[in-house]
Amino acid sequence: MAASDPQKLILKADKLTKLSMTRWSADWRQATELYEQAAISFRRAKNNESAKEAFEKASKGQEMLASPWDAAKHMEAAAALARELSNWREVADFYRRASELYMQCSRPQPASDALGKGARALTEAAPDEAIQMYINACCILEEDGKEQMAFDLYRDATSLYVKLEKYGDAASLLLRWGLAADKCNATQSQCKAYLSAIIVYLYTNDFKQAEKCFNDCCQIDVFLGSDQGRCASKLISAYREGDGEEIKRVAQSSTVSHLDHVIIKLARKLPTGDVSAFKSEALDGQEEALDEDDLT
């Protein structure tokens, strides 16, 4: 039964990978098989630390055997065990390495999925790193011309930005999502992303940025003629008029109700400040425009 002892399997595999006076080349094939057996045994025994280390070695072995796909699979297994051990640095490193290995064998979808898994694992422990992994996962899919498959990743990253109260970043990411949707002709998702970005800016009481965002989005015909475009127009008009009740009414509309839950929650809290100031600013702007045209 000694051969089934995972610790002895590891020791035997380690010897096979080291050069000596009697061993001039490493036997990675046999060593990798032993590492894999040990990893499975350790995992069954709930010895997660040893299982993680064995999967790392098995991954390296598969790399040495020029099998990046199998190496990536073992690295993902190591990452999952690192998560069980709350070793968040390793979780990030291992999922990133798995993604790189998948890319080596020209498999962008699993490469993106690996980063997505890492991001979800790090949401609570390292949210900033999780967001970056979400964004990198989106990039992989977009470079492969599969923008639509990135939508859930954009959604998760946006929700995390909002949770962290990084509203400017959330709005910027929503605009980027809209661009990705445009590239794959997902006009409904595109228009929802643009309306969501405007709502985020309004939630922060940054009317000037919301208005600029609205004007920019209105340069796009599909948004201008959409339900989301009309909803955004009503919101901007209500802010210009300083009409808090109208803002609340529009925020309760069915168009807003079909946005993502995190955006709906923000919209339901509008307005978040004194909107009468926006009306005063609009009137001042009109007066200045009239003064410029005054030839008397």
Image (cartoon, helix red, strand yellow):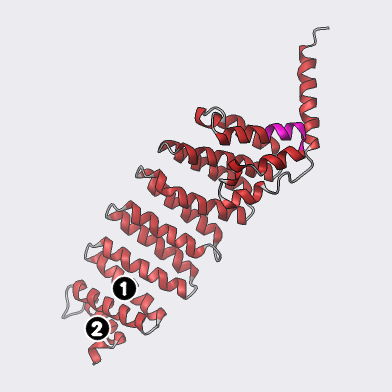
Q: Classify mark 1: residues with Cα within 10 Å, few (<14), some (14-19) or many (20+).
A: many
Is residue 195 placed above or below 98 in the rendered structure?
A: above
Q: Nearer the viewer, residue 227 or 37?
A: 227
**Picture quadrant of residue 49:** bottom left
| Residue 12 tag number | 2
**Picture quadrant of residue 203:** top right
What residue is pinned by disc 1? Answer: 57
Magenta span contains residue 237: yes
User: What kind of element bears circle 2?
Assistant: helix
Residue 72 x/y as whole percent: 32, 63
Looking at the rendering, the stretch of residues picked out in magenta corresponds to: 236-243
Residue occupying the point 43% across, 64% down: 93
Q: Nearer the viewer, residue 179 or 133?
A: 179
Identify residue type, mark 1.
Lys
Is residue 244 placed above or below 70 in the rendered structure?
A: above
- Left-right relation of 156 to 210: left
Mark found first going from the N terminus, 1 or 2: 2
**Placement of the N terminus among the 4 image quadrants:** bottom left
Residue occupying the point 48% across, 60% down: 119
- Left-right relation of 257 to 54: right
- Left-right relation of 208 to 27: right
Identify residue type, mark 2.
Lys
Residue occupying the point 28% across, 87% down: 8
**How many tags in the picture?**
2
User: What kind of element bears circle 1?
Assistant: helix
Residue 177 x/y as whole percent: 49, 43
